[in-house]
Image (tube, helix red, strand yellow):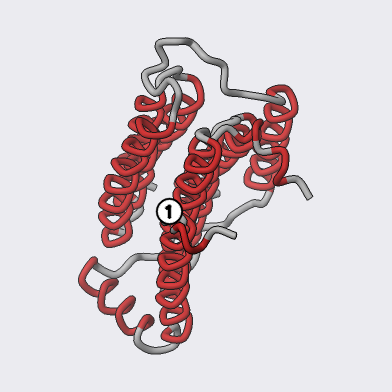
């Protein structure tokens, strides 16, 4: 076991959790979106530490775009995006806290009692990993990959149809 | 024991707990989506950790990560579509005011 990856994993992990908590603690919705961006970026950094370079870069790039869009939607739709009015936008706090706490504790119990055994196998280099993933996508998992593409297309059309303003002739 | 795996899985568990709390406690649709994003991020961390520390030879795990990432993007796209429609109809995306959606 080398100390470097352990320290970096712990650092980015704590950052991801901390920013995740800030998402629901801050009054400003724009800050919430930025905190979520930092949390997801920390997750991407964890991927890089775990030597999944392609997925790490993909995660950071995807989340940067996604959270920028989210921040725009926040400003558009929120009554108080800056949080100046100190509005409370929560409900059933105790139940939510209990559900989140139970989920966390149950997962931790399983993780810490499972007894994962080493040694940790070696990982191929980034270029070899990309080659293997390409072969996987265009080979055994091609049907799943094509299904995902179809799913994205369907969702894009559905989201546009839902969001588009109803025309006068569509009204009953 | 594999300390790196334990740390990564514990981070995943914490993200799941925080995300679940957020998705259940928020009244705004966009904030609920943020909670769901955190839950999905925890699934990503777990999958990459299992791939790296237990089975780095199984590339299908990365395929699964790509599918979860696609689901994250789709969830946001469809969620925002619903938010736009709701905002147009009612002028708000507060879920407390959406009681008529209850079956």
Res. B7 in view = no
Farthest right residue in view: B103
Furthest residue to the top?
A85
Question: In which chain is the residue bearing label 1?
Answer: A
Q: Is residue A130 left or right of residue A46?
A: left
Residue drawn at x 35%, y 53% is A50
Q: Secondary structure at mark 1?
A: loop
Q: How many marks?
A: 1
Looking at the image, residue A42 lies above or below residue A119: above
Residue A73 occupies which quadrant of the picture?
A: top left
Q: Position of residue A172 (x, y in %)?
A: 60, 60
- Please give the residue where the numbered disc 1 appears in the rendered image: A165
Of residue B23 and residue B2, the one placed in the foreground of this image is B23
The answer to whether A154 is drawn above or below residue A95 in the figure is: below
Closer-to-camera residue (B21/A54) = B21
Q: Residue at x 79, y 50 (%)?
A: B103
- Whether residue B28 is visible here, answered yes or no, is yes
Query: Relative to A98, is A43 above or below?
Result: below
The image shows residue A171, relative to residue B5, as above or below, that is below
Task: Give the residue at x 54% y 38%.
Answer: B29
Residue furthest to the left in view is: A127
Image position, residue A82 (x, y; %): 36, 19
Q: What percent of the width, then of the height, locates residue A10?
A: 41, 35
Callout 1 crowding tier (Cα within 10 Å): few <14, some 14–19, many ≥20? few
Q: In which image quadrant can residue B23 be found? A: top right
A123 relative to A148 in the view: left or right: left
Q: Residue at x 51, y 26 (%)?
A: A24
């Amino acid at each position: 076991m080398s100390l470097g990856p352990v320290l970096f994993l712990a650092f980015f992990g704590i950052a991801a959790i901390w920013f995740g908590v800030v998402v629901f603690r801050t009054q400003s919705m724009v800050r919430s979106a930025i905190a979520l961006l930092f949390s997801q970026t920390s997750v991407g950094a964890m991927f890089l530490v775990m030597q999944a370079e392609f997925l790490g870069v993909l995660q950071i790039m995807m989340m940067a775009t996604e959270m920028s869009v989210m921040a725009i939607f926040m400003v558009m739709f929120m009554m108080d995006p800056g949080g100046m009015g100190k509005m409370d936008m929560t409900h059933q706090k105790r139940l939510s806290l209990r559900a989140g706490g139970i989920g966390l504790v149950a997962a931790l119990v399983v993780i810490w009692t499972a007894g994962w055994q080493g040694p940790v196998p070696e990982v191929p280099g980034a270029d070899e990993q990309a080659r293997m993933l390409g072969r996987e996508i265009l080979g055994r998992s091609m049907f799943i990959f094509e299904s995902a593409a179809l799913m994205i297309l369907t969702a894009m059309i559905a989201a546009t149809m839902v969001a588009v303003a109803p025309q006068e002739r569509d009204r009953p | 024991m594999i300390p790196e795996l334990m740390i990564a899985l514990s981070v995943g568990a914490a993200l799941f707990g925080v995300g679940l709390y957020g998705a259940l406690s928020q009244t705004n649709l966009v904030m609920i989506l943020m909670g769901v994003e955190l839950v999905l991020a925890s699934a990503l961390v777990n999958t990459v950790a299992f791939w790296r520390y237990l089975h780095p030879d199984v590339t299908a795990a990365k395929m699964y990560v790509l599918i979860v990432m696609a689901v994250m993007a789709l969830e946001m796209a469809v969620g925002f579509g619903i938010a736009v429609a709701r905002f147009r109809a009612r002028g708000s995306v507060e879920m407390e005011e959406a009681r008529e959606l209850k079956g």
